[in-house]
Image: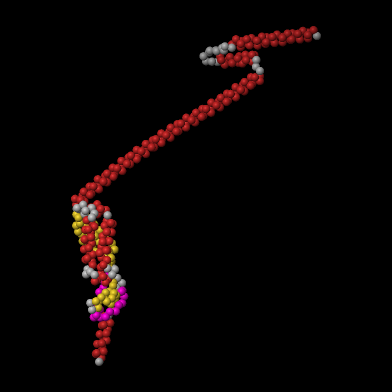
Amino acid sequence: MMIFVGAIVVFAFIMGIMSIRIIRPFERGLVERLGKYQRTLNPGLNVIIPFLDIVLKVDMREVVLDVPPQLVITKDNVNVEVDAIVYCQVTEPTRSRYEISNYIRAATKLAQTNLRNVLGELDLDQCLSSRDTINSQLRDALDSATDKWGVKVNRVELQRIDPPVDITEAMSRQMKAERDKRAAILEAEGERQAEITRAEGAKKAAVLLAEGEAQAVRERADAEKYRQITVAEGESKAIGSVFNAIHEGRPDSSIIALKYLEMLPRLADNPANKLFIPMEAAGVMGALTSMLEAANLTGVSTKTKAKNGGSKTQDS
């Protein structure tokens, strides 16, 4: 009896251990009971029926598929060697298990065929310059094809596109020629712009110089005009003052003759020792004669008065 009870305890312990299944967070468990899908186990501790249930674990993490290199003929009949990387992830574990036997191999082959189809519709230049477009087209094509497998293609990346050696050399020469052409165009454009800038600078300098000269001429003319006006006004005022002084003094011929006599020594100081006699010399000489006669008459009358005064004194 004790042996029997011990055997039962041991059997129960073994059955308890066999009935426990632990599913990790990135996994899902598919329970098959007698060959038929029963249910899906979530992460954590799960209990199954031993010997009747079988648990198939499915990895739900993203998988990286390396597409092998292959030769692809482009639209312009150029053979290029292409390889890519596909990032896919299981979204429905039951379909990824029961709809296809090996979704990784199937997705890889599908990526190869679709890569040939997409690149075959593009020429070489488009293949080299439109990587994002090619990646997007491949991702859409693969995602629509793998959807019924419960697999989602997140993205597709082209690793390399290698044209033949002769095409690469021709492209290198073409690129060099294109860059030389752009350099020559830029250099010519720079020289043209520099010539235009220098011409505009010379034009502006000439205009500013001409404007400065014109402004200087105007200012000099205004200054000369102002000087002449000021001098003329001063001379006018001086002449007016002299004229008024002469008229107020009421000069006669005697004063004019006296002034003439005062000017004679100045005229005689001329280094050329030349004396210019004005045409009014006769009138001046007449005035001098009159002055002399008046002076003589004054002197005679003075002497007469002196004599008369002396005689009167003696008589007295």
Whether residue 210 is situated above or below residue 309 in the rendered picture: below
Q: Foreground: 234 or 309?
A: 234
- Is residue 55 visible in the rendered image? The answer is no
Residue 103 magenta-highlighted: no
- Is residue 305 visible in the rendered image? The answer is yes
Q: Foreground: 303 or 126?
A: 126
Q: Quadrant of the N terminus?
A: bottom left
- Quadrant of residue 65 within the rendered picture: bottom left
- Residue shown at 63% from the left, 11% from the top: 287
- Quadrant of residue 311 within the rendered picture: top right
- Residue shown at 22% from the left, 49% from the top: 171
Q: Position of residue 181 (x, y in %)?
A: 27, 44
Q: Position of residue 175 (x, y in %)?
A: 25, 48
- Residue shown at 21% from the left, 53% from the top: 75
Q: Quadrant of the C terminus?
A: top right
Q: Position of residue 141 (x, y in %)?
A: 26, 61
Whether residue 261 is situated above or below residue 188 in the rendered picture: above
Spot the residue most to the right.
316
Q: Foreground: 198 or 181?
A: 181
Spot the residue most to the bottom.
1
Specify the segment rendered in magenta.
42-60
Q: Position of residue 259 (x, y in %)?
A: 61, 16
